[in-house]
Amino acid sequence: MFERFIRGRSLELAKKTALHLLSDKGEANAQNVAAKLLETFYSLDRAEQLSFFEFMSVNFNPNPAAVLAAAQRYADRPDHLSLSHLFLTVEPPRQELLRRMNRAIGGTHAIVQMRERLLGHLKAHPGLKGVDSDIQHVFSSWFNPGFLELHEITWSSPAILLEKIIKHESVHAIDGWDDLRRRLQPDRRCFAFFHPQLPGEPLIFVEVALVPGIAREVGPLLDKKALPLEAKKFKTAIFYSISNCQPGLKGVSLGNFLIKRVAEKIQKEIPSVKIFCTLSPIPGFTKWLDSGVKVEKFDLSSAKRAKVEESFKLLRAKGQPWAKTLSAGWSSLAVSEEEKAALIRLCFIYLSQETCTRDGDAVAKFHLSNGAQLYNINWAADLSKKGVAQSSSLMVNYLYELDEIENNHEAFVNKTVVFAKSLEKLI
């Protein structure tokens, strides 16, 4: 009973401190008040933190009457003064609260972690989306690419940083120190973005293989016993893994700038490297195959639509979801040519027709919106259990032609996927 009373007092203290921080008196001593608020927030349990988020959602919204009056004032007199007044009136006070919270020592990192806690509540409490939008809005300024520092991770980097790389690798798990050491040898590179307010904390990192040509399977790239290539053979940079380290920064654009910065850095330091390409997973493919796709919605000729329908029928012939077929011991090394062709064809349809929609593959969205071109679909490219389950072992090359990035990005914005002409033969 006493502990519950103490916790209840902590929640009330957090609310009062937030109100005080946003007041004129609080602003005068913002650093100390912000530190007190953050300390109190992190003393709360999960349910109390949810209550505090709900408090933020309800109590720090713009005044509707004031917004209406400011909008009418601008409509009547559309000058810079009335426009500035409208901006100030429309902005939720939560954003100013967050900016003042950020004045505490370590405030940026604390608010990133706070958003991670908030994201854990959003699905069950969608009413908190306004709070999340405001945090993401201020993050878009605080984590502007101009503030980010690009550093190469090497075997000489601090051990604590290397441990974080192992921990946060989310595409191809790092199997201990020997594996990591191979990934940091001269023909392998790892680059990460850092923020001045989060020293020693990588935000996102990308792993790169320097190889003679475009890689079409991931096994050789991950072979920790493989000998490093000679520098004279470096012709192509393969981005084979990109991982976020800060869940609280979900939705904040970092990876697209990282790939471009790394490509420019490699191009400058290793002039022999002319090709920049990914070897990427297709994490949404199996789920899409089992989602009851309506073939008639695709922008295809009747003949091509018929081929796609036949491909779906072939996979459904076993009378069970494709995911179950995969989990029952399916292997890309022991299938008919018809099944192989069907899977590659459907993968091309998935990537070229669905990526611009809500059901599109997240990795494809990332690279294509970033200005890459859909270049290759590779069979038996990832034979791991995860690779089979996600995409029937298929992987994709997205080609980054630095001179075409803007055109490809614009095409994707206009709902068009740019792909290599060689892929047209798949349907």
Image (tube, grey):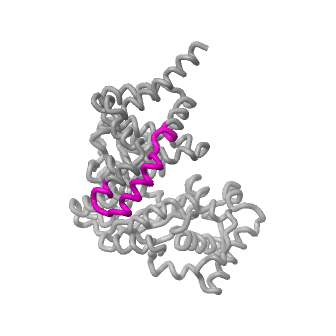
| Residues shaded magenta | 56-84
Tell me which residue sits at (36%, 31%) in the image.
Answer: 21
Q: Is residue 411 left or right of residue 196?
A: right
Q: Is residue 129 magenta?
A: no
Q: Nearer the viewer, residue 243 or 127?
A: 127
Q: Nearer the viewer, residue 93 or 221?
A: 93
Residue 55: % across, % down: 51, 35
Q: Nearer the viewer, residue 425 or 34?
A: 34
Tell me which residue sits at (45%, 37%) in the image.
Answer: 114
Task: Give the image quarter of residue 258.
Answer: bottom left
Question: How many numbered marks does the figure carry?
Answer: 0
Tell me which residue sits at (55%, 67%) in the image.
Answer: 357
Q: Main secondary structure of the magenta part?
A: helix
Q: 125 above or below 70?
A: above
Residue 140 seen in the figure:
yes
Q: 69 above or below 368?
A: above
Residue 54: % across, % down: 53, 37
Q: Is residue 71 magenta?
A: yes
Residue 38 seen in the figure:
no
Task: Give the image quarter of residue 163.
Answer: top left
Residue 79: % across, % down: 29, 62
**The N terminus - image quarter:** top right
Residue 331: % across, % down: 63, 60
In the orientation shown, which residue stands out farthest toward the right? 319
**The C terminus - image quarter:** bottom right
Tell me which residue sits at (42%, 57%) in the image.
Answer: 240
